[in-house]
Amino acid sequence: MKAGAQHVIVSRVLRWLRVLRQDLWTVTPDPLPPSVHLRRLPHGVVCLAGLGIGLGDMAQLQDNGHLGSGAAVLIGAAQGVATALALWRPIPAWWLSIAATVTEAVAVHGRLGAHAGQHFTWPWTAAGIIAHLFVLLLLSLRVRTRVSVEALALTVLVTYVLQTMWGASNYSSTGVVAVCLSVVVVMLGMATRGRREARAELGRQTTMTAEERARRTLLEERNRIARELHDVVAHHMSVISIQAQVAPHLVENPPDELKENLAGIRQNALEALTELRRVLGVLRAEHPDRPESPDEVGTGTGTAPHTPQPTLDRLPALVENTRAAGLTVTLQVIGKPRSLPPGVELSVYRIVQEALSNVLRHAPGATARVQLDYRMNGVGVSVANSRPTRPAPPSPGAGHGLLGMRERAAMLGGALFADFDVDGGYKVSAFIPVAVLADGLTYARRAPGAPEPVPGDVPSIVLSQAPATDPKGDTA
């Protein structure tokens, strides 16, 4: 049993020695980073302090320690170099400082009491204490807490061995002062390092939280867009089902093959409609009972579960509601209004709604101008506001309205730009292409290498001539 206890003690001592070797027997560089505000000024101060420490230690060892100039210069230079070296390699600097302290203690030990009336500071000189405090501080600022404690413990051990176990006579004891100041400096360095690491971790967490919030907002926006577009698709599927059911009655004596095909079309449409309703149920599960008017400005663009999706016919009503909220808005329609695909009309409506909502929140006192431009190959929309007349109050929103607008435009192959005007206002402009199915025209995307559109301008869309019978069915 006694042998077993001895074995446990020996194994623990060996493990501790291995840990010490891993932590303190290294020359890995660990440079002190520049200060945020002072840049390299602290480095210069430490280097100047090292120079002063070296000169002061040389003078003290020669005048009071009665060492030869060669030994005094060597030991003083070692203390000064250790102070400066701690800026780049703190652990080797700590070893150099300990070695210089032990060397000068051994060198002066035989001369203590040789001159009557003189009491030399031993085992630490004043310059040696200052140098070691600099080294311990710079070390504890950059290494793990365990390494700092190990360095402090070995410093205390060296001091105890020199002053208590070896000892001397006729000297001014500096061991207790050196140990107390070393403890204070190491605690200060560890606290500063812990605070810096906590601040860095908080910054990382804040960045991750912001990225996660942006990612979540993007997914929520896509989810909401998907809900609205599923409504549009479900409407089309319902129309297909009804038309397939009515079609046989529009033809006198329809053949059985026609009836069978139309019945199959209707059955497939009904099955697709059932699946769409299931998907809609899942997409609406988050807020199934939250009603929200599609024309309500400033509270998002969601809709109640069974509210019909808005179209551009309701754009004047949206403008009137915005005026009622206190914003001066003008609406200008360019080109001949025509019916557009429901997804396009819904996206344009939502872009205008979100843009006007942003004007209300972020540009108090400004006036807004909505412009809707019907073109042969698509529809352009822009919402511009003048410079606000007073500061905007804090907004409770997540600040990702532009993200949703860009998602809507990109989903339909369009583009959206938002930027400040030269007069201090803000402008949101978008263009959504609409395929022209007559005369074999098809929508063509921007060719590779073509110049990027200028922000703030409505990009032009190119139409290309395609055969009337396109085998790939590339018409959008």
Image (tube, grey):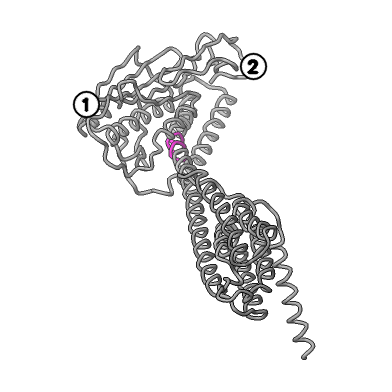
Q: Residue at x 37, y 33 (%)?
A: 309
Nearer to me, 232 or 28: 28
Magenta stretch, residue numbers: 223-231
**Does 89 appear in magenta?**
no
Q: Residue at x 34, y 22 (%)?
A: 421
Disc 2: which residue: 471
| Residue 328 badge | 1
Which type of secondary structure does the marked residue at label 1 adopt? strand
Give the spatial CA distance, label 1 vs label 2. 51 Å
Q: Is residue 3 left or right of residue 271?
A: right
Q: Residue at x 48, y 26 (%)?
A: 412
Nearer to me, 214 or 243: 214
Discs 1/2, front: 1
Q: In the image, residue 384 lies at what x, y percent?
A: 32, 23
Q: Residue at x 58, y 76 (%)?
A: 116
Q: Is residue 82 left or right of residue 8?
A: left
Q: In the image, residue 99 lies at what x, y percent?
A: 68, 64
